[in-house]
Image: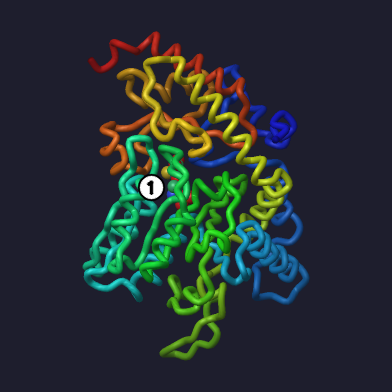
Amino acid sequence: MLNVEQIRKDFPILERNIAGRRLVYLDNAATSQKPQSVIDALTGYYQNYNANIHRGIHTMAEEATDAYESVREQVREFIDAENSHEVIFTRNATEAINLVAYSWGNANILPGDEIVLSAMEHHSNLIPWQRLATERSAKLVFIPVTEEGELDMEEAKKLITEKTKLVAVTSMSNVLGTITPIKELAKLAHAKGAIILVDGAQGVPHLKVSVKDLDVDFLAFSMHKMLGPTGVGILYGKTALLEAMPPFMSGGHMIQSVWRDRANWSELPWKFEAGTSNIADVIASGKAIEYLTALGMDNVRDHEIEITTYALNKLAELGDIAIYGPKDATKRGGVIAFNVDSIHAHDIGQICADAAIAVRAGHHCCQPLMRDLNVMGTARASFYIYNNKEEVDLLFDALKEADKVLGHVAYR
Ligand code: C6P
């Protein structure tokens, strides 16, 4: 189990007061806070060895290159990939998914092909496929979500067919919290000759991941949701797929030789990293991985189950609350989307903000799922390694207040 009180000391922002109250940060699904080691790595790079990478041969250029490339190896180890050249640095998970949609998608999706998604995808794992499907006259197919908020695997078995070229699914919903059975989906996809891309933006920060064990073809995630800085996404891809794909962006650094009328490409992973990389943020991301590795991802998950179970039970005491997603915390991550009576989600967000509690309110970039749930939006609390039960109690108190002030009268 995690020593949450000890962990909290590593996150200076948690000392912050807002309008005289201690900050309660429950918006971790949007972005996590950063430990001091990550902040120090950022300033350390700029203070001591700021230089461009892969180009210079001076000392600082070599130091920066070594630091940057060593994070690639850390990421490889963290997700248990075969080779570090299968790890591509992008700006965020969204860009990683777009890279696959443009580069692999345009080369492989033909008219009539089917791309299978789930009904709970974030827009980042929906719109790139919508655009590809429109351009290539392909079809999008959606695996539904059951009443219990789980992915309907019986339907998945029927919907993944010989026509399927790609299954692209989230490993954890940023609204329902639902954890999807990726290993099973990978087997279903491969049995039909399709490949699988996993949107790990929510899953990777919270669950132990082995791309080898899951046998996924692509995995996309963002470091900023797992203690790292913004501006760093990861695309993992199997070597054979990445080697066969044309570059996504082109320009400096991704080439081997250039003539006036043509060029050929660098080897992996640099073929996909055109231009100057986000050096400082990648280097600081290494400290985030170090931090999570030291805690142990099994412990991170155990803490999440404990605090989510507590929160689900506590919030249910309100009575007037609708909580979306699986009831059992072992089937979901620490993301709780909810509505209280008929109070608008933004009003809940505001009342929480007045109590220095940061939650998110809105459609969470999942408008199709909101339509399925028949709501305009929800409020959402999301937890991470530094959240404790007292913070859940403070959220409960704020919601009770919202219900007292606005419940029963709001929007009726
Ligand atoms: N969800 C949330 O508050 P980027 O922005 O590229 O780092 O991550 C996109 C993304 C992709 N998939 C899922 C499942 C996600 O949850 C997100 C980001 C944030 O829920 C911001 S909208």
Q: Is residue 95 above or below residue 247?
A: above
Instruction: Where is residue 50? Give x, y as percent.
Output: 70, 61
Q: Is residue 217 above or below residue 144?
A: below
Tell me which amino acid carries mark 1: His
**Res 252 visible:** no
Instruction: Where is residue 283? Give x, y as percent.
Output: 67, 57
Give me the residue at 42% from left, 67% from top: 190
As helix, strand or loop, the secondary structure at mark 1 comes to loop
Residue underneath mark 1: 122
Q: Is residue 82 above or below residue 381?
A: below
Q: Quick one: label 1, few (<14), some, or many (20+) residues within 10 Å? A: many
Residue 244 in which image quadrant: bottom left
**Is 117 placed left or right of 135 in the picture?**
right
Looking at the rendered image, the quarter that the C terminus falls into is top left
**Is 59 placed left or right of 34 in the picture?**
right
Q: Is mark 1 within 8 Å of ligand 1?
A: yes
Q: Is residue 134 above or below residue 258?
A: above
Instruction: Where is residue 164? Give x, y as percent.
Output: 31, 65
